[in-house]
Every structure is written in C-alpha cells, then in structure tokens.
Amino acid sequence: MTRFLPRTLLTPAVLAIAAISIVPLLITLYYAFVEFSLLTPGEHPFHGVTNFQFFFTDGAFLPALKNTFVLMFSVMLVTVLGGAALGLLINEAFPGRAIVRVLLISPFLVMPAVNALMWKNMLLNPIHGLFAQVSLFLGQAPVDWLSEYPMLSIIMMVSWQWLPFACLIFMTALQSMDREQLEAAGMDGANYLQQLRYLYIPHLGRAMSVVLMIEMIFLLSIFAEIFTTTGGGPGFDTTTITFMIYQQALQSYDIGAASAGALFAVLLANIAAFFLMRVIGRNLSK
C-alpha cells in the first residue's frame, strides 16, 4: 500500500496539469480538423487539413512568419548586448548604485499594453511626442514612427521592456565571478578588454543561454504592443503569427483556421525551445 502512496499523492497535481494544458491542446487539435465558424453555429463536420491549407496559403502568412522572426531575433540581440553592457556598467560600486538598479529593473514591471500606450502617445507621437520635440529642437522634421518605421517601433517597445530582465540575469551572474581571478589577471597586465574577452564573456555564457531561451518563448507570443499601436499594419508590416491567429479567430470568426495556426505556433515554439535547450545543455556541461 505504501508503494502506491507517492503516486496517489501526485494524482491531484497531474490532473491539474492535464486540465490546464493538455485538455485545451486537445480541444484546439479537434477544432483544427473540423469546420467551425462563429458565423455559422451548429454541427462541426470533419474538414481534414483544409484549415491548415487555408492558414498557410493566406497572403499574410509568409510576412507574418518573417515578422515573427525579425521581431524575436532583433529584441534578443538588443537585450543580450544591452543587458550585458548595463550589467557590466553597474557591476562596479558607485554612489547610488542601489537606486540605479531599481530604476533599471522597473520597466519590466510595466504591463505590455501600458508600455505600448506610453510609447505610442508619449514618445512616438509625431506631434507632441518626445522624439518629435527632440527633432524640432534639432531643426529636423518630426517622424511618424508608427507609420514610417512600424516594425522598428515595435522592436523598441519590446526591447525597452525586456532589457531589464536581461540586465537582472547578467547582474546576478556577475556577482558570482571569482574576484581573485580578476585581480590576478590585472596583476598579470591584462587590460579591461582582455578581461572582458577571456573572463567576463565566458562567465556570462550560461546566463546568456537562459536569457535567450526565456525570451524566445515569450517573444513568440508578442501581441499587446502590436494590437495597441499598429494593429498589424500598415499592410502586413507588423503582423506576426500570434496576431494572425487573433485575426482569424476574432475578426474573421474562423475558429478552425485559428486553431490550425495555434498548433503551428505551438510547434514553432517547441522547435525553438528544443534547439535552445540543446545549446543550454552544452553550456551547462562545460
């Protein structure tokens, strides 16, 4: 009897995980293979792979796939390089360092929709936004960022919010560096650039892998910034796979096609996570 006790105690947790994740996934899988439109309620006849064909042949699919990767890799590049630079900058002691650290981390606590509204109305607005006022001060014409550079605008919004996360991870990693090793390198004549190349960057390798894995999973589902600012436009310039799924489900009312797109997004996220886990595994084994 005692042999089955641990499994019995784990049963509620397993059932909770199944109810939260597996059941919705199975329902989505079912909807992906049936004809289900909110405009024609009733029975849902088997539709085969038609929903997948409809989703993949949509004119927005290839631009959305490209935009998803451009947004994801651009934000990861900015946050990893910027986070490492900020982490190294505030790693050294200086007056007010604790306050600076709190201020650097605070953007990560802002909700995505609030972040988007702040950038849209306070920074990027071509009339009274901060960037427009700076352009006027320099004698230049203001730029309508969301119309002329929509994807760059989204990248700036998302990078600003995720930069503190990367900075926090790198700050934590830098705290565990061997100070005696750094002092020995300085005594041997190694300048800061040499220490950066041979000591700091190798030490931050694991932290970079963790930042990339977590950010990739979340950046594949970016939605609020796009919905609040550009609405996927102009044209398909800021439409991503996530936003395309929203359009199919809540604008075209085609739950079947949206479910097919959702399964594709899940597959895409799992493939990305698989390769990242392999990279992290190799780093952790060193």
Image: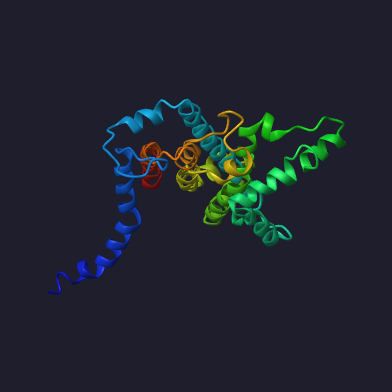
Query: Which corner quadrant of the image does residue 17 belong to?
Result: bottom left
Q: What residue do we see at 65% from left, 37% from top?
A: 153
Q: On screen, 87 above or below 76?
A: below
Q: Colour scheme in the image? A: rainbow
Residue 215: percent from left, percent from top: 49, 45
Residue 139: percent from left, percent from top: 87, 31
Count of numbered marks = 0
Residue 140: percent from left, percent from top: 83, 30
Q: What residue do we see at 64% from left, 57% from top?
A: 106
Q: Quadrant of the C terminus?
A: top left
Q: Quadrant of the N terminus?
A: bottom left
Q: Could you say which is closer to the camera, residue 111 or residue 27?
A: 27
Q: Could you say which is closer to the camera, residue 107 or residue 283?
A: 107
Please indicate, yes or no, whether residue 257 appears anywhere in the rendered image.
yes
Q: Residue furthest left?
A: 1
Q: Is residue 122 toward the left or the right of residue 259 in the image?
A: right
Query: Which corner quadrant of the image does residue 130 belong to?
Result: top right
Q: What residue do we see at 65% from left, 54% from top?
A: 104
Residue 18: percent from left, percent from top: 29, 57
Q: Is residue 44 toward the left or the right of residue 246 in the image?
A: left
Q: On screen, 17 above or below 259?
A: below
Q: Could you say which is closer to the camera, residue 243 or residue 12?
A: 243
Q: Is residue 149 toward the left or the right of residue 283 in the image?
A: right
Please indicate, yes or no, whether residue 195 appears anywhere in the rendered image.
no
Q: Residue furthest bottom?
A: 2
